[in-house]
Amino acid sequence: MKNQRDIQDEKIPSSNRSTAIAYLLAGLGIGGVVSMFLAPRSGAETRLRIAGKCLDCIDTANQKVRETRHQVKDTMDQAQQKISEAVVARREAIAKSKMAVR
């Protein structure tokens, strides 16, 4: 069994060292090329894209608010119409009952 001193005394042969450095440099080069192809857009392009998406969301929200307002207005108009009809019917009923009492 090797102790720590024996392991420290062993040296990596120079051929293995140069191969390891070559692999390291190749890995760095490949990583650099791949990162260039996969890198996101520039900062200005990214900000413009985010701003565009935000504006689209705001436009969509505004459209939904307008549609909801229209639906609420229609519902309130219908409710007011029904209330008016009920008031007229009630007044007619009261007027008939007063005439019947006389």
Image (tube, rainbow, N blue to C red):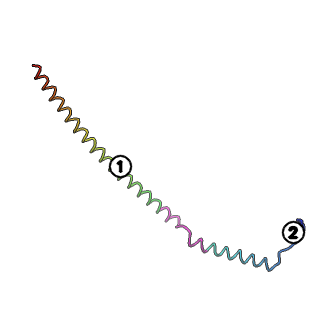
Give whichever of discs 2 and 1 has the lower sequence position: 2
Q: Main secondary structure of the magenta part?
A: helix
On screen, 53 above or below 69? below
On screen, 73 above or below 99? below
Q: Which residues are magenta?
A: 33-47
Tell me the tag on residue 29.
none
For mark 2, what is the residue? 7
For mark 1, what is the residue? 65
Task: Specify the quadrant of the image occupied by residue 92.
Answer: top left
The N terminus lies in which quarter of the figure? Answer: bottom right
* Residue 34 image position (x, y, % from top left): 60, 73
Relative to the observer, which residue lies in front, 66 or 46? 66
The C terminus lies in which quarter of the figure? Answer: top left
SS category of the residue bearing label 2:
helix
Q: Are marks 2 and 1 in contact (CB under 8 Å)?
A: no
Left or right of residue 41, residue 90 in this image: left
Q: Amino acid at mark 2?
A: Ile
Left or right of residue 89, residue 31 in this image: right
* Residue 97 is inside the magenta segment: no
Image depth: mark 2 or mark 1 in front = 2
* Residue 47 image position (x, y, % from top left): 49, 61
Q: Amino acid at mark 1?
A: Val
